[in-house]
Amino acid sequence: MERTKIILTGLWTALMFTYLLGDVLRVYSGDVKPGELFGQKASQIMYLGIAAFMFIPILMIILNLLLSGNILRWLNLIVTLLLFIINLIGVPSYKSWYDAFLIILSLVINVLIFWQAYVWSLS
């Protein structure tokens, strides 16, 4: 069980860094304009929403380190499935090659998290 928790923590960390790398590259490539999100002036609510979304992998890292049992297994399954669906819906919006590469990587990491949690034996 501890081995699985370590693997899940590592996979959530990889997912977090993949998201972060995409954001950093978007800024440096000039694909985003400062103060704008999705072609409109960014509001505090938009930034709060993005911060909350980006905190999900961080929260899962913390929970995988602190919790145990069946609830942790189900949290990993549900959260990674939701992130997979959200990212899959967003795939068409990524026009740059690096973004497409990173979103595909994040989808693969989500599949690995789901599979690891799915086969997790809690005995």
Image (cartoon, helix red, strand yellow):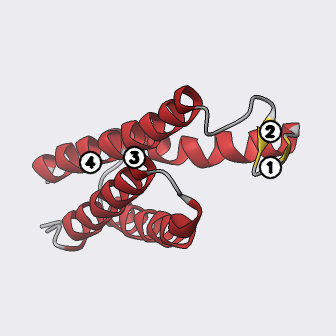
- Checking the image for residue 85, the label placed there is none
Asked if the residue under mark 1 is in contact with the one under mark 2, i.e. CB atoms within 8 Å, the reply is: yes
Residue 36 is marked as 2
C-alpha separation, residue under disc 3 versus residue under disc 2: 20 Å
Residue 62 placement: quadrant: top left
Disc 3 to disc 1, how far (Cα)? 20 Å
Residue at (50, 66) in percent of width and height? 91
Disc nearer the start of the sequence (4/1) = 4
Could you tell which of marks 3 and 2 lies nearer the N-terminus? 2
Amino acid type at circle 3 is Tyr
Image coordinates for residue 61, horizontal then vertical, percent: 38, 41
Q: Which residue is mark 3?
A: 98
Amino acid type shown at disc 1: Gly
Label 4 – label 2 distance at C-alpha = 31 Å
Q: Residue at x 34, y 53 (%)?
A: 101
Snapshot quadrant of residue 72:
bottom left
Helix, strand or loop at disc 2? strand
Foreground disc of the pair 4, 3: 3
Could you tell me the amino acid type at mark 4? Leu
What residue appears at the point 23 percent right and 62 percent down from the top-left corner? 112
In the picture shown, does residue 122 fall above or below 63? below
**Residue ID at (41%, 57%):** 100
Distance from label 4 to label 3 (Cα)?
20 Å
In this picture, residue 15 sits left or right of residue 91 = left
- Quadrant, the N terminus: bottom left
Circle 1 residue: 39
**Which residue is labeled 4 in the image?**
11
